[in-house]
Amino acid sequence: MSTSAHTQQQSMTPAGSALSAQLAGESEELAQFVADFVAVPSVTGDEGAAAEFLEAWLLQHDFEVTRHHISPDDLERWPDCAGEKDLDARPNIIATLRSPNPVMAPVVLNGHIDVVPTGDVSRWTRAPFSGERSGGRIYGRGSSDMKGGIAAGLFAVRALRDAGVALPFDIEIQCVVAEESGGLGTLSLMRDRPMPAAAIILEPTETRIVTACGGAQPFTVDVVGKAAHVGRPWTGVDALDKVLLVHDRLRRLEAERSDRLSHPLFDQLPRKAPLSVGRLEAGEWRLTIPDVAHWFGRIGTLPFETINDVRAEVVAAVAELASDPWLRDNPCVVRFDGPGFAGWETDATADMVGALAASVSHLTGDPTPSSATYGSDAAVFAQAGVPAVLFGPGSMSEAHCKDESVDEAELTYAAQAVAMTLAQLGDSESFRSTHERTRA
């Protein structure tokens, strides 16, 4: 069954239409909540204050709230995340809406409260954590990625509760830490919480329904040269020159992979599995030929690829640089930073996708399934066999950028779509029959 056919079979319930109207009346409250949330800095590793902000708001609005702490044992279970610090001060926050008759596993809304560093603050037009509202937008780090998405999910679930919509499943809103550094927050939760029936990850998708996502593996290449005085450079070996050889080879690797790999939701993109460098380092002193250089970047994967296979391709490509006599005797070292995010794909005929498509169609949006080229915590759910989609306000073109912002109207639209989708799932006999049999 095509997604469009699946959508046409589902008409919007009266409850869904009422939820949409209710949330339209809460637009100002939602926008101000996001502005206040953004104003609480939560760079990865220092999410404690934002967790407390969320917890206080949830308790004020009569949610059932749980603090979930990542265990030190999780660092042993996922050694690629061993660099995570101060776990006691960085809890995941879970808000739960209980069903009066939960006959299946919960449905999860998931979003990360951590944000990336601001970089040079002087290059921002507005203060990075101002939460300033101007021209129908909210500005600040995390507004798009992804405090706006979390807020849309919270208001959607509150609307369901206040409207008295009885669902056959609990809803868990998981507000997690440590996503930007590798996903340990969600990995830990998935080990400790019931396996959900379905999950919406509230990443910024411009309210497109993303059913297929590329993965991502961050990595570093270390290159050794030989120091020399800049007045006699021929007596040394410039590590910067050598690391640029690494960069050229990795760029060719991306092109080779693009020619070789194909997926219908990715083939139309300018770069279907992007490989990029975020930072280059070389040398310590301007009057010394650098003897060490480092390449910091990431490689994208397509949904059907494994992280280990892509790691092997990177290692093999860098090993080819042994054709350079210096690099043959002083080989580059490749280090993989964190576990990476696997690519994934959810069947477009899944009940979750159909319900979300019906809701988006009712709101006159585009229900066509689409793809994304960035890693996210959706991979954790998809790898566990949980139908997952990305859907949220904001744009990845804003994420990790100066003057990050989110559109206020889009926040309301996303909240309406999520609330209506959950109501649709609650009325879906197909969803109930499928997951009653597999209840955790």
Image (spheres, grey):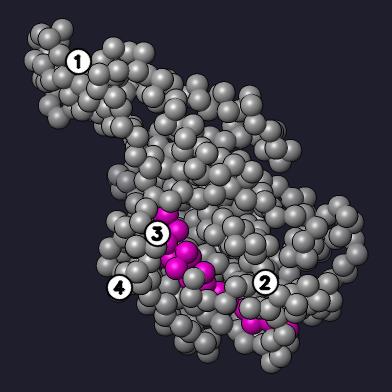
Precedes in sequence: disc 4 or disc 1 = 4
In the structure shown, which secondary structural element does the residue marked by tag 2 occupy?
A: loop
Q: Residues within 10 Å of mark 4 (few under 14, many from 20)?
A: some
Q: Which residue is mark 3?
A: 78
- Is 236 in front, or is 272? 236
Which label was assigned to residue 89?
4
Above or below: residue 117 compared with residue 263: below
Residue at the spot x=28%, y=12% of the render?
325
Q: Residue at x 52, y 87 (%)?
A: 64
Q: In the rendered structure, which disc, 1 or 3, sits on the residue that comes first in sequence?
A: 3
| Three-letter residue code for mark 1 | Val
Residue with the mark numbered 2: 197
Q: Is disc 2 surrounded by few (<14), some (14 to 19) or many (20+) residues within 10 Å? A: many
Tell me which label, 2 or 4, sits earlier in the chain: 4
Instruction: Report the quarter where the N terminus lies.
Output: bottom right
Task: Identify the element where label 1 is drawn.
Answer: loop
142 to the left or right of 194: left
Which quadrant of the figure has residue 259? Answer: top right
Residue 137 percent coordinates (x, y):
53, 57
Q: Amino acid at mark 4?
A: Ala
- How many numbered callouts? 4
Boundaries of the magenta span: 168-190
Residue 124 at x, y = what percent? 37, 46
Give the residue number, with chain letter if any, for mark 1.
237
Q: Is residue 266 above or below residue 166?
A: above
